[in-house]
Image (cartoon, helix red, strand yellow):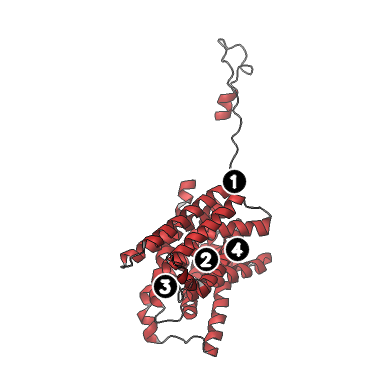
Amino acid sequence: MRSRAAAYPLLAALGWGVMFPVLASALNRVDPLNLTTARYLLAAVILVGILLLREGSGALRLGARAVEVVVLGVVGFAGFNLLTGLALEHAAPQQIALFVATTPVITQLVRWARDGVRPKPLLLALSLAALVGVGLVITRGSLAGLGQFGVGGLMMIGAVLGWAIYTHGASRFGEWSPLRFTTLTALAGTAAMLAASIVADAVGWQHAPGVGDVVAVTPQLAYAVLVGAVVAVLAWNTGVQRLGAANAALFMNLVPVTTFVVQIVRGYRPEPVELVGAAITIAALVAANLAARPRTEALPRTPALPRPTAVTDPVAVTDPVAVSAR
């Protein structure tokens, strides 16, 4: 069952790993806020339609958890996606993907702040090692490259923090289906994205795309909506419910691997120091997640009793080992 459940966050991580290069290729025609808003307006319509067909109109009611759903939708969906879209204007897709891979560690820190579950010192040390690896990729091993961290890196720190809060929050909605949780938080996040885009267009921070621009990015938009915003998010929330936030977050380490592969296929040739940095980051994050996972204590084994040679009393000769194995 656990191996089958692992397929969900695996699918999400692979889908998102491909998505970053796809989105980056669309930003030369559409501004990031408008592109992100268009993605989730379309995705929200699809999700609502599926939810109505599967669970009926009653599933759209927020009930007593309205505030929590809105906060998670705004922080997770709007915060992560808007900041990631903006960061792609300042950093390469493979750099963005490495920041996303820090989600497991950030999720543990969120648990510390929200639930009082203090991470081990080893986790903090490995987190520092992961950030060193990110720094090597961004700067390519040169101090002169520190300026590339700048705005894009700060945006991604905020984006990952928002997604870690969202992931931690998803684990508290076990009584809701992943489809319902995804749809309702997506609606809240999409409303926030739409408001941000309207304001940005009105004050001249960005410009509404023309028909030609939308047509030019239709393939990228289709992938980002169907795979990145619908299938991947549904798969992610399903994995969080079945595996737990900490275990599901481990799969985010595959995001930069996928993105690097896509970029290399597209002709990008990473320098050796970038590969070293990526390897350090991924190894440190995997080790940090494994160190943070709770260990189940082995139950003491019941010693086997000698089997009697003759059956004289059915109750007296019952084998407790055999009973416990049934």
Q: Amino acid at mark 2?
A: Leu
Numbered disc in front, either 1 or 2: 1
Cα distance, mark 2 to mark 4? 24 Å
- In the image, which disc is placed on residue 23? 3
Q: Is residue 254 above or below residue 26?
A: above
Sequence-wise first label, 3 or 4: 3
Could you tell me which secondary element the residue under label 3 belongs to?
helix
Label 2 neighbourhood size at 10 Å, few (<14), some (14-19), many (20+)?
many
Identify the residue at horizontal 64%, vertical 16% (top origin): 316
Residue 281 locus on image (x, y percent): 47, 57
Could you tell me which secondary element the residue under label 4 belongs to?
helix
Q: Amino acid at mark 3?
A: Leu
* Labels 4 & 1 near each other (Cβ < 8 A): no
Cα distance, mark 3 to mark 4? 23 Å
Label 4 neighbourhood size at 10 Å, few (<14), some (14-19), many (20+)?
many
Sequence-wise first label, 4 or 1: 4
273 or 231: nearer the viewer = 273
Circle 2 sits on which residue? 51
Identify the residue at horizontal 51%, vertical 62% (top origin): 54
Sequence-wise first label, 2 or 3: 3
Residue at the limit of the structure toward the front, as seen here = 143
Circle 1 sits on which residue? 294
Label 1 neighbourhood size at 10 Å, few (<14), some (14-19), many (20+)?
few
Identify the residue at horizontal 56%, vertical 72% (top origin): 79
Cα distance, mark 2 to mark 3? 27 Å
Sequence-wise first label, 3 or 1: 3
- In the image, which disc is placed on residue 165? 4
